[in-house]
Image (cartoon, rainbow, N blue to C red):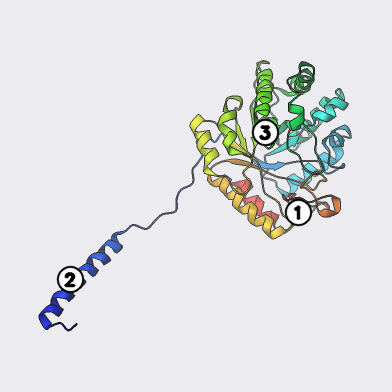
């Protein structure tokens, strides 16, 4: 369609005005800033920087690790850990109810020795009293089937005697910064309510002693955090693949501290493992949450070894120190996070 000069100038004026307004709006639009991470308010456990630790001797079962207790190896491995990671402040260790059933007099003594070694290295510790996680080989602990029997008075009393044998010696021990009642109790389908009832009983038994104990439960399912809040002085999550906002928001809601008591998803590929650690540790530090990497040393315990020493499952290889005591390639990147 042809336009005369007057029509052309009128159309150009309209278009020019529209373009000017569009340009002005575009210019005035503020740049989108990166969203700030949800930060923990109660940072009383932000100082926690360290590792989960399973001794490197034995066949990978809890009963073997504890009944054949080897303090010289434990001391050597923790010393190597402090040498490679001098800024570490804490470790998390697993106890064994099965070992206690086999050796009820010796296990409390071994536990005391373990705590003494940890203290000598200038570290604090979170002992895990019961365990519900299962790997290959099976570490041992409270299985879903066991939970069905925990309400029976005879069995419950034996379990409480195990708890008392530890607390009688170390309830007020300043080297212990928290007690983990049970590692990952809500993983089994259909058993969550039974586990919650059992843990409530354990919590009540400990609190009835009227001692100063900080109690927690290590979980990897964030949806259970509010359910366990009444029986946790400290929230403890396993932020594999990164710490999400939800646990921080829940901790802030109740004004309770939070710690990432297991992090560092594994891989047989060193570079892949390092990249995962960057993401996971970065998310903890950004949210002002202390962390414990899984795990310090090579062990035949599930997920802490190479194929030559047993099955490697989906969690891959999670040790930071190799079987020969050398630092796993690339894992010097942990040190700056320990300093933050």
- Seen from the viewer's position, the closer of residues 278 and 312 is 312
Give the Cα separation between the discs numbered 1 and 3: 41 Å
Residue corresponding to mark 1: 327
Examine the rendering and report whether any part of residue 110 can be seen.
no
What is the quadrant of residue 138 in the picture? Answer: top right
Where, quadrant-wise, is the N terminus in this rendering?
A: bottom left
Closest to the camera, between mark 1 and mark 3, is 3
Query: Callout 3: 10 Å neighbours few (<14), some, many (20+)?
Result: few
| Chain-order first, disc 3 or disc 2 | 2
Which label is found at residue 190? 3
Q: Alpha-carbon neighbours of circle 1 within 10 Å: few (<14), some, or many (≥20)?
A: some
Q: Position of residue 61 (x, y in %)?
A: 84, 38
In primary-sequence order, the first of circles 2 and 1 is 2
Q: CA distance from mark 3 to mark 2?
A: 69 Å
Residue sitting at x 50%, y 37%: 249
Crowd around label 2: few <14 · some 14–19 · many ≥20 (10 Å): few
The residue singled out by tag 2 in the image is 14
Circle number at residue 94: none
Regarding mark 3 in the picture, which secondary structure is present there? loop
Q: What x and y, as percent, mark residue 250?
A: 52, 35
Residue 114 visible in this rendered orientation of the protein: yes
Separation of marks 2 and 1 at Cα, in angstroms? 70 Å
Query: Is 107 displayed left or right of 277 in the figure?
Result: right
């Amino acid at each position: 369609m042809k336009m005369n000069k007057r029509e052309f100038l009128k159309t150009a004026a309209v278009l020019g005005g529209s373009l000017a307004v569009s340009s002005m709006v575009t210019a005035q639009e503020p740049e989108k800033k990166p969203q700030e991470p949800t930060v923990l308010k109660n940072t009383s456990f932000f100082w926690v920087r360290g590792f989960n630790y399973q001794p490197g001797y034995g066949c990978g079962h809890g009963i073997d690790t504890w009944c054949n207790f080897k303090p010289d190896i434990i001391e050597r491995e923790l010393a190597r850990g402090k040498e490679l990671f001098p800024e570490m402040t804490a470790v998390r260790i697993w106890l064994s109810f099965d070992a206690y059933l086999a050796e009820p007099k010796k296990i409390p003594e071994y536990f005391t020795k373990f705590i003494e070694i940890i203290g000598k290295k200038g570290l604090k510790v979170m002992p895990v009293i019961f365990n519900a996680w299962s790997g290959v080989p099976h570490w041992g602990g409270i299985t879903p089937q066991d939970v069905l029997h925990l309400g029976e008075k005879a069995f419950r009393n034996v379990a409480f005697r195990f708890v008392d044998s530890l607390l009688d010696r170390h309830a007020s021990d300043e080297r212990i910064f928290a007690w983990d009642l049970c590692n990952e109790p809500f993983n089994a389908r259909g058993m969550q309510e039974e586990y919650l009832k059992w843990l409530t009983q354990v919590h009540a038994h400990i609190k009835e002693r009227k001692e100063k104990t900080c109690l927690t439960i290590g979980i990897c399912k964030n949806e259970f955090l509010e359910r366990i809040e009444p029986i946790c002085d400290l929230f403890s999550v396993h932020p594999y693949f990164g710490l999400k906002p939800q646990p921080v928001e829940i901790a802030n809601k109740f004004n309770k501290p939070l710690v990432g008591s297991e992090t560092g998803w594994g891989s047989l590929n060193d570079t892949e493992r390092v990249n995962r650690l960057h993401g996971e540790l970065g998310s903890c530090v950004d949210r002002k949450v202390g962390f414990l990497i899984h795990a310090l040393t090579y062990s035949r315990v599930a997920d802490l070894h190479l194929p030559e020493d047993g099955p490697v499952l989906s969690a891959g290889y999670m040790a930071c120190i190799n079987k020969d005591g050398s630092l796993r390639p690339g894992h010097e990147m942990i040190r700056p996070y320990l300093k933050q």
